[in-house]
Amino acid sequence: EHESGRSRKVKLSRKRTSKTQKIIHDPTAKKVVWQLGMVFKDVKEFRQAVTKYAVRRRVQVEKWVNEPKKVRVRCKDGCPWLLFGCLDKTTNNFMIKTYNPKHTCNKTTRNYLCNAKFLSEAFRERITEQPNIRVFKLQEMIKKKFKLHVGKTTVRRARAKVLKDIMGDHIVEFGRILNYKDKLLRTNP
């Protein structure tokens, strides 16, 4: 009876050490390094990390199971690389549960995860500085930075997304012009 009490204490102390040593994902890091037990803020941050990894490593991965509480990512070319993250019920964190780091596939020059949403986040600063930047110039920058080919339509969508975020929606803004007129007439008849 006395010995079983000690084993319980050992189990509790192990749990405490595992909580203090959890690996938290840094979304600002340039390179994504996966580790078993890595913790993410939420599923959205995990998906962004997967996209960032796939684009930087130039590998074709697919979100095989893509649900709000679990995401399973595998390599498209049939290589054994696998990543599974889900919501941990005890800590309520999104965490990597399964990870096989071996890639046997070749690098690619096209990646469907390098979409307009990813590009608008990656090149937001540049498009903000140069709102009239040409599509082919952006394509060259993408090719130089990520060594990937992206179509003109995708680049146009990315640029339009950033410009819409900066300038706002024109229809909504023009709808407010009558309110502005009324305010001017009230303050300066």
Image: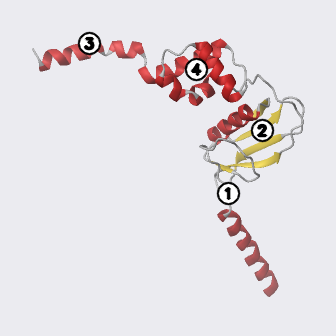
Q: Name the residue tied to disc 1.
A: 90
Where does residue 32 sit, x and y in percent of width and height? Answer: 70, 43
Mark 1 element type:
loop
Q: Residues within 10 Å of mark 1 (few under 14, many from 20)?
A: few
Q: Do the residues labelled 3 and 1 touch (CB within 8 Å)?
A: no
Q: Are marks 2 and 1 in contact (CB under 8 Å)?
A: no
Question: Comparing marks 4 and 3, which lies closer to the viewer?
Answer: 4
Q: Quadrant of residue 52?
A: top right
* Residue plotted at (77% across, 52% down): 36
Q: The disc labelled 1 sits on which kind of residue?
A: Thr
Confirm whether residue 98 shows in the render: yes
* Residue plotted at (77% across, 38% down): 72
Q: Name the residue tied to disc 3.
A: 178
Q: Quadrant of residue 47?
A: top right
Separation of marks 4 and 3 at Cα, in angstroms: 32 Å
Q: The disc labelled 4 sits on which kind of residue?
A: Ala
Q: Do the residues labelled 4 and 1 touch (CB within 8 Å)?
A: no
Q: Name the residue tied to disc 4.
A: 158
In the image: residue 30, left or right of residue 188:
right
- For residue 72, the mark is 2
Separation of marks 2 and 1 at Cα, in angstroms: 20 Å
